[in-house]
Image (cartoon, rainbow, N blue to C red):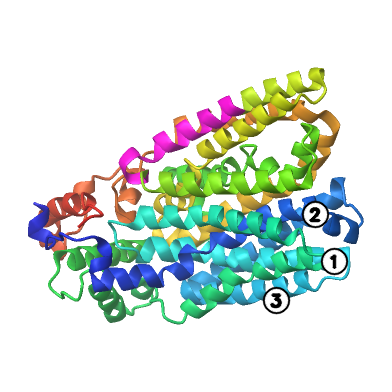
Amino acid sequence: MLNDIIPARHKLWWHYPGLRTLNLLLLCAVVTDITNGYDGSMLNGLQILPEWRNFFGHPTGSRLGSVSNGVRYGQLGALFVSAPLIQRLGRKKPIAIGSAILLVGVILQTAAQNYGTFVAARFLIGFGNTIQTTACPILVSELSHPSQRTQMVGIMNSTGSLGQLMAAWITFGTASIAGSWSWRLPSALQAASSLFQMILCIFVPESPRWLVEHNRIPEARHILQKYHAEGNSDSPLLKFEMSEIERTIEEEKIQAVTSWKEWIRTHANRHRLFIVVTAGFIIQWCGNAVLSNYLHLILVNIGITSNKTQLLINGGISLNGFFWGNFFSLFVDRLGRRPLWLIGMAGMCLSLIVITILGSFQAKEKFSSALGWSAVAMWFVFGAFYKMPAPMANSYIAEVAPYNLRAKAFVIFGFGDGLSNLFSGYVNPIALAAIGWKYWLVWVFVLVSNFTIIYFFYPETKNLSLEEVSRVFDHAPLAESDGGETGSERREKSSANSVEVRNMDLSE
């Protein structure tokens, strides 16, 4: 029984010093998506502000796409250095490095005097943020308490909605400021989360898995004992975790699975690669990129032209995403990964079908107010369904990829994310201007394709440790998991310990 392996906890997690300290320190990684969410929402708000449009010469089409894609170019550039940094320096140092680069970009963006400087600044922001967003989910996945790993990664992803919310209402508030500070101030405040991350990185512990790989086993054991076992050196959970980590890394070292070619060496890894590649596109090719970066164009197309009204809608959509992102992140382990993936895609598809129908009526009615506001309401419904898969995307990638390929997996996932957004950044504003409501039909078909891929190729990873997920892909029995001993003792006790740890509850 569970009480035989872990002392019963009758209070919530913040009553336990080790777990409380760990979760507070992990905020240095948890808040990373604030920057990404803030950036998209801020760009929406800036496009609505007359001061910004006038200052940069009313950019449209590919010129407007370059403003959005400046971040994406930086993202793609950073992916070439992210994996080596994470593998050589650990998880926490790259977070600080990425934060420093991003802060330079924010300063340049805030002080921009022309279009070229603004775009260059956005390249640095994307470069730094990508190093952060590659390292942070790995640190959270490998350092979080096993009973809270999925929730922590889910909350990390939902902080993007917090960033959207902050930017939306900041740009609403600064709209009344005369002069260029109406858009410079929101630009400057983008630095807040990265500054916070840089400071907290000094104190957060390193990933125990990275420490074990680099033969720093006593340090890894000390971290797990302090933060997972509340200082108990005889904790069965401590023994189980150390045994799992050491066994997995030992096997991977024996197999010498360190090159990029490892992705195609086995059927299991080819399956993993397919998931990692497609997930980056699927999570961005839902139609969400149109809304997150070009809300101004969408609202103009449906007859809502008031700057104040557009800013209020932008704020409302951000609040909607923040609520649903946090809500669904709490149910990832209860509902499972596949239901959230599939229901989310189906819900978004149905929402876009309704939006397409409303758009066709709108074209015939010539900007009916009722139809326009009905479309806005459906965007809120769409946003709720989008937040079903979004909070668990990084967690799912961390679970799918084995330890030795985890950093590379996030690089590949980032390429898919970056390329999909790069495409959308140029195509979306041009397509919206050219065919209007008919453009939503494209995303309806894309969502059908997404649903099909997930249904046939994405396995369930609910309630499994990172090491146990590897055995799901390799079709090895979970009962072979180590239980704290070595040799024959491991095999005898592994099954019971594995089941007990997987059934840990957050309230304990």
Assign a secondary structure to mark 2: loop
Span shown in magenta: 332-351
Residue 498 placement (x, y as % from top left): 19, 53
- Kindly identify which numbered label has been placed on residue 49: 2
The residue singled out by tag 1 in the image is 179
Q: Residue at x 29, y 65 (%)?
A: 245
On whether residue 338 falls in the magenta region, the answer is yes
| Spatial separation of the CA atoms under disc 2 and disc 3 | 24 Å
Which quadrant does the C terminus fall into?
Answer: bottom left
- Given residues 359 and 65, the one toward you in this image is 359
Closer to the camera, 211 or 131? 131
Please, what is the three-letter code of the amino acid marked with disc 2? Leu
List x then y, in percent, for residue 156.
47, 58
- Magenta span: predominant SS is helix
Mark 1 nearby-residue class (10 Å; few <14, some 14–19, many ≥20): few
Chain-order first, disc 2 or disc 1:
2
Of label 1 and label 3, which has the lower sequence position? Answer: 3
Q: Which residue was labeled with disc 3?
A: 104
Q: Residue 21 location in percent, x, y?
A: 32, 73
